[in-house]
Image: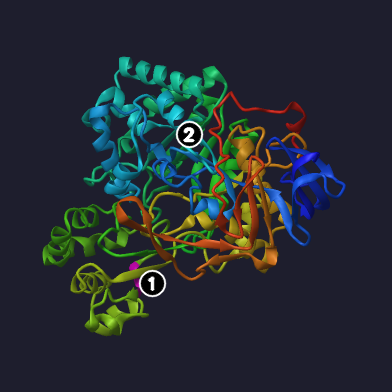
Amino acid sequence: MSTYDTVIRGGTLIDGTRLPRRKADIGIRHGRVAHIGRIPAGAGTTELDASGLIVAPGFVDLHTHYDAQIHWDPYCTVSGWHGVTSVVLGNCGFGFAPVKPQERERALLMMTRTEQIPLDTMKAGMQWAWESFPEWLDNLERIPKGINCVSYVPVSPLMIYVMGLEAAKSRPATEAERREMQRLLHEAMDAGACGFSIQRLGPNSLQADYDGTPMPTDCMADEDILALAEVLYERDEGFIQITQAEAGNPVTATPEAIARDMNFLERLAETSGRPVLHNAVAVVDEFPNAHKQSMAWIHACNERGLRLYGQAATGRIWFEYTFEDWNLYDFSPPWNMATQGTHEEKLQKLADPQIRRAMIEDYPNFMTAGTGGRLEHITVKSSGGVAELEQYVGKTIGDIAAAEGKHVVDAILDIAVAGDLKPLFKTGSAGPSLTNPAAVAEMIADPYMIPGVSDGGAHTKFFSAGSYPTDLLIWLVRDNQLLSLEEAHYHLSYLPAQAAGFLDRGYLREGAPADIVVYDLDALKIVPDDGFEVRQDYPADEWRRVQTAEGYRWILVNGEVTFIDGEATGATPGKLLRNRQLEVNPSAVSAGG
C-alpha cells in the first residue's frame, strides 16, 4: 500500500516564503502536503518526475472577473493555463449578488460594456439560481471547479438591491439604507465573503455602464463606503479592493485632487482596520516617478499602521480592438457618446463631422495610463477585409495622419468607418513600460506590491492579461535576471494569499493544501507571444482573445492534477474558500520570510 497519493520527485523547491531553494521530494496525501524531503521510491500511488523542473506554490490572483465564466469554464482560463490555482471574484464592485429576480437582466447588461462579457454568453452559460449573497456562495460551492475561488461582496449590486438603480446612481444612501447595507454585509461575511470591492472613478468613468452612465459605486459617497468599512472593523476580518481614482486623468489631475484620493484611502484603511488593496500602481513612461511616489506613500501608510497594499500592473500587455466593441475611452464624454448604440448608430456618429470635432477637442485630455497609450502609437493590425485599407496595415496612426495631413482622431476613425468598424487596431503597452524592466522589477520587489490586475474573465475581446505570472517569470526572472525565483514566487503566491487572509495558501509546507505548479523555466512561453489567439469557445457561439502557456508540466489543485502540458485533465478539485471557514492546519501556518 502506498504511503502517498502522489509524489513529486526530484524537483527544485521554491516554497513561496523567500527561503532559499532546495532539491526535495513532495509527498501528497488527501489533498495536502504530507512530507517534504527524501521519499523512498515507490511510496506514491502516482509518481511525477520533476527532475530539472521548478516546484512552487500555485499562483494567487486577487483581481479577476470570472463571476460568470466560472459557470462554464471550471478552470477559469486564461488564468488556469498560467498556473493560477486560486482566484478572487467580485472585483471592482461588479457582480451578481445580491440581485432580485426581476433585476437579473439589468445586472447582466451592466457587465456587457464595463467588462465586455457578451449578454447571450452569460444567459446561456450561467444558470441563475440565487438572490442573496449567501445563496451566491452556495452556488459557487455547488458548481464544479478546477480552481479555488473566494468572493468579495461587490458593492454595486448591494447598493442597487437596497436603494434601487436610479437612487444608487444619483444620491447618497439614507441612514436606514446604510444600516441595511451593513446588515447585508454582515450576512455575507457570516456566509464566507472575503470582504467588499468598489470602483470609484467619478462621473466620467473609464468603465461605464452599458448605457454610458457611471456605475453605481463610481460616484458613491464617502460616508456610505466608510459605513461598510465599519462592518469589517467590528468583525476584525475581511479586506477591501478599491479602484479609487476620482482624481481622474493623470494628465489633468491636480495635486489637490490626487491628495484627496490618497486621504480617502487612508481613512478607509483606518476605519476598517483591515487590508486595503489599492488599484493600480504601474510603471508608465509619461510619468516616470508616479509609481515611486505611490510606493513611498504606501510605505508611509504602513509605518503608521494603515494596512495598504498596491496592486501592481506588471504584465507586458496591449489591447487589440475594433470599434465594434471598444469602450475604454469612456472617460471622455464625447468618445463615450460616439461609441454607444447599435452598429449602425456607431457608424453614423463616428462619421459625423460635428461629433468628430468634439472628439478632437477632448483628445488632449486622453488618459495615457490604462488605455494603451495615445492614438499616435496605435498600429493598424488588419484591414477588416477591405482591400483599399490594406495600405495601412502595419503602419501607426501617427504616421498615417502625418502622411495624409489629418488629425490622428480623423485618421483612425476614417479607417474604422471605411471598414464598417471591422479594422483591427493594436495599442502599445497597456501596462508597464515595455522598455523598463528594471523599474518594474524594483516595484515588484517592494514588500507592499502584489502583482496582477489580470482582470481575468473580462475585456475578453481586447486583451488577455491572465498570462501575467508566466510573463513575470519569463521577463523579470529568466530573461533579464532582475528578480530571483524566490522573490518572484513570494509575490505571486505567498504575499497575495496572506494579504487576503488565506492563511493556508500561497506556500508549500507540510500540512498546506497541495496547490502546486511544476514547470521548466527555460521552456516557459506565452502562446502567441506577440498577439492573441481567437477562440470561439464561449457559450452562444461567442469568441474571445486568449494567450495560452507552454512549459508548465503539471498544475495541481488540492493535490489533484488539473493540467498536464497545458491540457486540462477534467479533474475539478477546486474549492470555495469561505472566509472564517478555512481548513487551516495549525502546523502549516508558520510564516517564513
Task: Name the side, left or right, on which 255 lies relative to 520.
Answer: left
Query: Can the viewer see residue 310 in this picture?
Result: yes
Q: Quadrant of residue 379?
A: bottom left
Whether residue 378 appears in magenta in the rendering, the answer is: yes
Q: Residues within 10 Å of mark 1 (few under 14, many from 20)?
A: some
- Compared to residue 147, the image places residue 185 above or below, namely above
Q: Position of residue 119 (x, y in %)?
A: 27, 47
Q: Position of residue 419 (x, y in %)?
A: 21, 73
What residue sits right under mark 1 in the picture? 377
**The C terminus lies in quadrant:** top right
* Image coords of residue 145 (percent x, y): 51, 40
Around disc 2, counting alpha carbons within 10 Å, would you say few (fewer than 14), some (14 to 19), or many (20 or more)? Answer: many
533 versus 175 height, above or below: below
Which residue type does callout 1 highlight? His
Mark 1 and mark 2 in contact (Cβ < 8 Å)? no
- Magenta stretch contains residue 398: no
Q: How many marks?
A: 2
Report whether residue 402 is seen. no
Q: Nearer the viewer, residue 481 or 580?
A: 580
Residue, disc 2? 151
Q: Nearer the viewer, residue 299 or 12?
A: 12
Tell me where the magenta segment starts and ends, as one range.
375-380
Query: What amino acid type is highlighted by mark number 2?
Result: Ser
In this image, 528 relative to 378: left or right?
right
- Quadrant containing the N terminus in the rendered view: top right
User: How far is disc 2 from disc 1 in space, using C-alphas?
Assistant: 38 Å
Say whether residue 354 is left or right of residue 320: left
